[in-house]
Image (cartoon, rainbow, N blue to C red):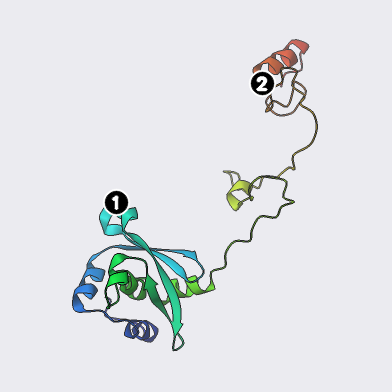
């Protein structure tokens, strides 16, 4: 644990029940935190290296006496023992009030509407090009395939996009290959 804790962090730790062995393990191990849902933080013991995913547990966040605290953990130690587990102590001390607050204010993403033109939601990454510019998202059209070879992905020999090889050859023979 850090020696220079803020008053809020001390209040969080005061809400938990743990011993010196747990405190020592929390201080020695590496921790990662991911807010996975409203009032839920995945706490990962990164000390396990490439096996760290086997040591990740979701910790619920609750509010006690006006203080946001780790309330329950899905790890075996928390389920079968009375004192609080190292994952809850790590969230309180290493993650601190910032991670706890993020879990409390987290809002689930809105479900995709049924009248969306695509099968999946468009993300910010879908909208950005590698040069930082934005890409216009076009709604699919109901036009029939324009490729004489029946290729579903090919826009045909007269399109601006890159066509299949056969359509490219047709355009090349006509002299209008781009």
* Left or right of 30 on screen, residue 114: right
- Badge 1 density bin: few <14, some 14–19, many ≥20, Cα 10 Å: few
Does the image show residue 96? no
For the residues labelled 1 and 2, the Cα–Cα distance comes to 45 Å
Q: Position of residue 163 (x, y in %)?
A: 69, 23
* Left or right of 103 on screen, residue 165: right
**Looking at this view, is 64 or 98 the one in front?**
64
Q: Which mark is residue 51?
A: 1
From the viewer's perspective, is the residue at label 1 or at label 2 nearer? 1
**Looking at this view, is 123 or 171 the one in front?**
123
Q: Residue at x 71, y 52 (%)?
A: 114
Q: Which residue is mark 2?
A: 164
Q: Position of residue 12 (x, y in %)?
A: 37, 82
The C terminus sits in image quarter:
top right
Callout 1: SS:
helix
Picture quadrant where residue 45 is located: bottom left
- Badge 2 density bin: few <14, some 14–19, many ≥20, Cα 10 Å: some
Q: Residue at x 51, y 69 (%)?
A: 38
Mark closest to the chain's N terminus, 1 or 2: 1
């Amino acid at each position: 644990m850090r020696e220079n804790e803020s008053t809020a962090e001390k209040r969080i730790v005061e809400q938990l029940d743990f011993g010196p062995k747990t405190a020592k393990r929390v201080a020695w191990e590496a921790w990662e935190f991911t807010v996975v849902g409203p009032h839920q933080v995945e706490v990962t013991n990164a000390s396990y290296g490439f096996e760290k995913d086997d040591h990740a547990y979701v910790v619920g966040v609750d509010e006690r006496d006006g203080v946001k605290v780790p309330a329950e953990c899905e790890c075996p130690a928390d389920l079968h023992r009375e004192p609080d587990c190292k994952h809850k102590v790590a969230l309180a001390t290493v993650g601190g009030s910032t991670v706890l607050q993020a879990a409390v204010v987290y809002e689930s993403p809105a479900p995709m509407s049924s009248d969306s033109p695509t099968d999946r939601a468009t993300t910010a990454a879908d909208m950005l090009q590698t040069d930082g510019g934005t890409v216009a998202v076009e709604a699919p059209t109901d036009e029939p395939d324009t490729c004489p070879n029946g290729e579903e992905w090919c826009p045909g020999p007269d399109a601006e996009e890159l066509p299949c090889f056969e359509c490219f050859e047709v355009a090349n023979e006509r002299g209008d290959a781009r």
